Image (cartoon, rainbow, N blue to C red):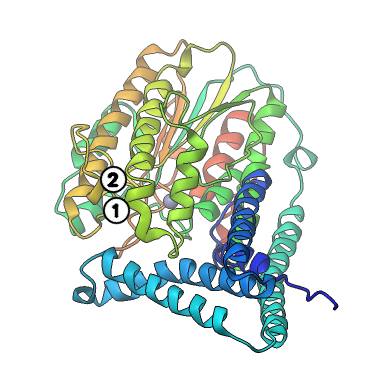
Amino acid sequence: MKKKLIIHPALFAVFPFLFFYAHNVQDLQQLRAVWVALVVGASVGLAFLAWRLFRCFLKDRTKAALATTLLIFLLFFYGHLYGILENWASIVAGHGYLIAAMLAAFGLGVYLIRRARRDLGTITRALNVVAVVLIAMNAGTVISHEVSAHRAASAWTGITEEVALPDVDFMPDIYFIILDEYAHPDTIKEHYGYDNEQFIEGLEERGFFVARNSTTHTDKTARAVASILNMEYAPETEPLRAAWRRINQNRVIDYFQAMGYTCIYFGHYHELGRYEINADMYVNYYEDADYQPLMAEMASYLLRNPAFSPFHDSVGGERYEDYYREGLLNTLDHLGEVHEMEGPKFVFAHIMAPHVPFVVGPDGEHVEAEDFYNYDDEEFYLGQYIYITQEVTGIIDDLLNESDTEPIIIIQSDHGPRWVEGWEKILNAFYLPDDDHELLCDSISPVDTFRFIFNHYFDAGFEPSEDARP
Ligand SMILES: [Zn+2]
């Protein structure tokens, strides 16, 4: 007898990951091939094990395969079902009932499969076809996205092909600090009733120019950062993946390196991918954290998939957030010390605060796990906002007081809190050693940040980008 082709359990074991990836491909950074291979390999391996086990029990490879696919289906459907029921609240008191119902469904399914006397070839072939079609459709989405992201990113050219490098003596250290989702003083006052004028005035007293009418054109972090670091608006129509690529091979760092600067990047918190940024030194956000970085990221990443999210607390617990807090504190500790390094430096720090998770209160106290993503209660965003404001003030003082030569310091938010009106207003503050503030305008676009710096200090001759604003 000719053996039936049975591929559906393996394909269905791959499918949930591919589906998740295809539906989040806009927002995800490049995945690490090794992690993809591990997760998919583990999933297929477990499916194979289950199949072998069911074979012992059902004494039939076709039936065992059907039981395996049923098990996979129930496992991945569980999280979605739990999410649906949870939204209608009172229906489930907890996991207990749902797990019992799922087990009953599985038991009944296996019982029916075992009892079946018919040849199960037709249903096996049908499942094979369905699995192949589902995989092909989602793979198509991923591939077409990858291709267009790659095309968009490779359309940009290196900066040094466009401008001549000047010969300059004055090469101050330059600090560019992004506070992710940091509200403009007007926004924090209007929506949170918090007066942050003291911070702004403090900056001005220290010699900063604060561009009070500066706005961003996008609420997408990657697009905002790609635009700043390439001095050109990253198109809204382009996949976000293209923006990540533009960050990784950005023209600002290219230019600084060509000028002889050492470029140091303080990474922000990451998903599986990272900014593989073209800097000379990468200060890992998590360097001193106790946790296994990739495991924690993996937990966070997988648990945001609705299929797994109900298990977040029991599997991932608070590990990711504890780890995140350590990473944040670690970055803040090191940033104030980096001036001790020899030679001209461009330091880019992307600090993921006051952005979620809300892990610290105004005085650095630990926030409880259940409130890490609590946007409803204003105290959590505000707490982390106040905390990061104080920390950054301390870092600025360290840099100003302890640097051998006066540095340039730029503090910016990529966008304000995106859930309120006025998110496009940003904090945008410049400390320039020679106090040439009249050259800066109150509404300077973040995209012009480095056009200004390169023109003013290195005579680079870039046109302002304002006309190109989308
Ligand atoms: Zn952001």
Q: Which mark is residue 373?
A: 1
Q: Residue at x 43, y 59 (%)?
A: 308
Report the label total: 2
Q: Residue 21: image x %, image y %?
A: 58, 62
Q: Is residue 279 above or below residue 96?
A: above
Q: Looking at this view, is 197 or 144 the one in front?
A: 144
Q: Is residue 27 above or below residue 408?
A: below
Q: Are marks 1 and 2 in contact (CB under 8 Å)?
A: yes
Q: Residue 363: image x %, image y %?
A: 18, 32
SS for callout 2: loop
Per the image, the residue denoted by label 2 is: 358
Residue that protrudes farthest toward the left in the picture: 193
Report the Cα–Cα distance between label 1 and label 2.
6 Å
Circle 1 packing at 10 Å, graded few (<14), some (14-19), many (20+), is some
The image quadrant where one finds the C terminus is bottom right
Q: Quadrant of residue 151?
A: bottom right
- In the picture, measured across the screen, residue 352 lies left or right of residue 192, that is right
User: Which amino acid, mark 2?
Assistant: Phe
Return the disc, 1 or 2, that comes first in the chain's sequence.
2
Q: Looking at this view, is 191 or 400 the one in front?
A: 191
User: Which amino acid, mark 1?
Assistant: Tyr
Q: Which mark is residue 303?
A: none
Q: Residue 247: image x %, image y %?
A: 61, 45
- In the picture, measured across the screen, residue 428 lies left or right of residue 157, that is left
Q: Residue 215: image x %, image y %?
A: 41, 55
Residue 234 visible? The answer is no
Q: Residue at x 39, y 70 (%)?
A: 103
